[in-house]
Amino acid sequence: MSTAKRAQASRQQPGLACEACRSKKLRCDREQPQCGTCRAANIACVVDFDRLPRGRKGNVKSLQTKIGTLFENLFLPNPPDPYPDANMTMFDAQGSIGGSVDIEPLKKAWPLLDLSDLICADLYDHLYFDRVHPFVPFLNRYRYFRQCRQAVGDAPKPTRALRHAMWTLAASFSTQFQHIQKSLYAQTKMILEELDSTASVEPMTIKELQARTLLIMYEIMHMDFRTAWISAGNCLRLALLLRLHEIDIPEFSTRTSDAGRADLSWSEIEEQRRIFWVVFTLDCFMNLINEAPFRMDEETILTRLPAPEANCQTDQPIETAFISEIISGQRQAPSSSFVEIIITLAISGHCLLHRRRSLAENVHHTGTTAFWDRHRAIEMLLTRKSAYSIARPSHDSVQADPLSLLSNMMSNALVLTMYKLIDSTKLDKTQDQPTIEKYEQKALDAAKGITALSHVIPSLSYFKVHPFTPFPMMICIEFLLSRKSVNERAPMQAAEVWRELQSICSVNNLAQICSSKLKIVD
């Protein structure tokens, strides 16, 4: 059969098979945005674009042997003492690096290692993209590796700051490298302080903003919340300074201080869009936790929403909508966990404003008509959002897309927040009872959804659980405890979510903060 006929006879589209077909060992037709199998089963179709192609087992084993020998020659100049019980497997995620490495001599030799070494740096880079990038997806992997083939010591300070920030988070997401995360954090802070000292001479760069953003993630998980909240606010101001909130207006290229923007490729501009939206989401989360007003209104944001991950990584241009178009219902958002979190947070900002106005109305006794008008307007936003919401994630889909778990939890938590507003406002319980009962049932269903989603956590490695996951879990527990006198199932559901929250306290400082706010006897 000729090549042309063989291509014509193929039943598959080019690309990767989805995770559902892989797990069931089915032939995937690779249709986008949803393959035939997932469409027939009415489940989310998730493709892991970071999955590396499989090679022959013999080649992989040979590479593992060479890597082990290379580590010994580079990092262990003297023959180490044998540690037969200390062998640990280096991260073997998606075939990045495999094989057994004697970790104890590696720990002893670590202070002598030069982190600028390309091989050691490459190890951390791959660990970052495997475990951290799914939570903060703003880098183009191919371009990053292409640009970072030079020694770290010879790179500009913003690039060094970014790489050290990446390595800090990568080390914190690894059981093997926990012991160096604090020193990496200190080195990153030192580089950023050097940049601050020359701020009047050297202009602010995207890489510096990216480095600062990654440090916020680290501070949320391993340091005090106040430090992370202040850092998030500063990052948002830096993003505004770089005018990343108005990338997609025609005159942007002439207004920005970045003279080389006109020469940027689509994926480079998309990378700038993505860092803005990551900073936006971090700031929104921090303000939600503190019940503080949002600093930005979606109507003033003139940067398009992030494109699908596949388009970003393969440099395939696509025009996405503005967030104001999604909120107003002019356009429908793409099926993406990242975008869904952004939309959910924007609607949460409306809820916060609704709450502040309701408190003022309670103080001034100005009636409840305006309350229900605002409440119905936000409910309409939630109804629109449900039209493109991603289906409830399973264990397999969370493995491929860790953001999907947080996205679904936050959607349910928003429903709980809406009911909490009703419950805390002075309303005419007799006149509004049918409406209140309707919202109460929606809230009970949402709490049930978060409870079911929390059961996925024990089957995941802790680095697959987003750092902000404890927040919607806390909202769910608070709601269930408030209903324990009228719903006999509520205390049991609260206990289930509480147990899963406790399971991540040892690796997530925010989980500890959320737990301390809940008065529960374990």
Image: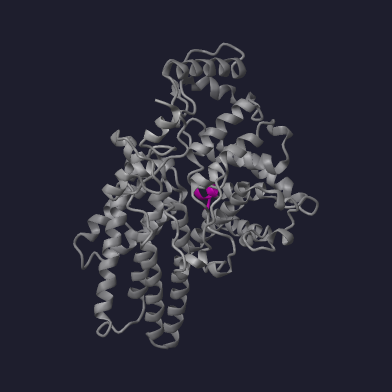
User: Total of numbered circles in the picture?
Assistant: 0
Say if 474 sits above or below 34 in the image: below
Q: Is residue 218 magenta?
A: yes
Say if 445 sits above or below 157 in the image: below
Q: Position of residue 217 (x, y in %)?
A: 53, 48
Q: Quadrant of the N terminus?
A: top left
State the residue at coordinates (73%, 40%): 156
Q: Main secondary structure of the magenta part?
A: helix
Q: Is residue 266 visible?
A: yes
Colour treatment of the image: one colour
Of all residues, the one furthest to the left in this rendering is: 488
Q: Position of residue 380 (x, y in %)?
A: 38, 72
State the residue at coordinates (58%, 69%): 300
Q: Is residue 201 magenta?
A: no
Residue 163 left/right relative to 89:
right
Q: Position of residue 43 (x, y in %)?
A: 30, 49
Of all residues, the one furthest to the top in this rendering is: 79
Of all residues, the one furthest to the right in this rendering is: 201
Q: Is residue 522 visible?
A: no
Query: What segment is highlighted magenta in the picture?
Result: 217-224
Q: Position of residue 275 (x, y in %)?
A: 58, 52
Residue 483 left/right relative to 8:
left
State the residue at coordinates (50%, 67%): 325
Say if 184 sits above or below 228 in the image: above
Say if 188 sits above or below 52 in the image: below
Q: Quadrant of residue 257?
A: bottom right
Give the camera-side residue of 485 and 254: 254
